[in-house]
Image: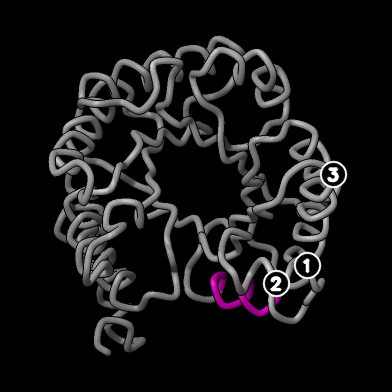
Amino acid sequence: MIIIGELINGTRKKIAKAIADRDEACIGDLAKRQAEAGASFIDCNPGTVGEDEIRDIQWLIETVQAVTDVPISFDTPNSVALQAAFGAYENAATPMINSITAEQERLDEMLEFVAQSGANIVALALSDAGMPASADDRVETSLRLIDTLTGAGVALDRIFVDPVIAPLSTDATCGCAVLEAVRTIRQQRPEVHITCGLSNMSYGLPERKLLNRVFVAQGIAAGMDSAIMDPLDAQMMATICAAEAVAGRDEWCMNYIQASRDGKLTQ
């Protein structure tokens, strides 16, 4: 599974303070631990706006790439900050843009740059109609956004579709709608990756990690092959390993066996 490590996020109080204080040790340690735990990308979200966001994302990129070669996910809606992130990025590995949507203003502002960047792209199934309400809404917006991106020259295997998870606490049908959308997108556009903001599912509910683990296992069975998540959650990582084996995505169960040998399946 392609894991996008979510922990360097300036909307978290501890991380916001570390960014404001330019605490390289804190951010560097968090980047290294996520990489060592199995993150495929390290997401960097400064959580600030305007000129601060531009400076902060540059600093985050420089700090993270100083301690790990794992590629970075640039998490900003600001096109100027996004360009600044690319300017600061020196890693040879292809980075990720998190994210672009089907909202026309956002497309007009970002599509050409995103397409020409050569980066992987999280394609968030949001349109000018707002939050998708059903599986059909998610599929229609996702397919339209995929076709827009490929029409601009983006390869299908660089696209990471996010069908948009709403909290179960506000929409009890969201989990079913997202899973149905994942199955349909996987069937109709098999070359794309399908990701999600995993922790959104459990927001506002008790025992959040339990809900997240159950959903990721069902998502893998439906065709999801990526998640924006906490790679330091050992139980979650074990669940992913087991779910991929059960879903037939681990030949001879070798990854599962190796994880057992490494003591990663028991806590």
Give the structural element (helix, strand or loop) at label 3.
Answer: helix
256 to 181, vertically: above or below:
below
Q: Are marks 2 and 1 in contact (CB under 8 Å)?
A: yes
The residue beneath circle 2 is 17
- Report the colour scheme: one colour
Q: Is residue 209 left or right of residue 124?
A: left
179 to 253, vertically: above or below:
above
Q: CA distance from mark 2 to mark 1?
A: 5 Å
Residue 113 falls in image quadrant: top right
Residue located at (74% from left, 67% from top): 19
Q: Are marks 3 and 1 in contact (CB under 8 Å)?
A: no
Q: CA distance from mark 3 to mark 2?
A: 17 Å
**The N terminus: image quadrant:** bottom left
Residue located at (61% from left, 15% from top): 105
The residue beneath circle 1 is 20
Residue 99: x %, y % from top left? 56, 36
Q: Earlier in the sequence, mark 3 or mark 2?
A: 2
**Considering depth in this image, is 5 or 55 the residue closer to the camera?**
55
Tell me if mark 3 has few (under 14), some (14-19) or many (20+) residues whose alpha carbon lies within 10 angstroms of its own: few
265 to 150, vertically: above or below:
below
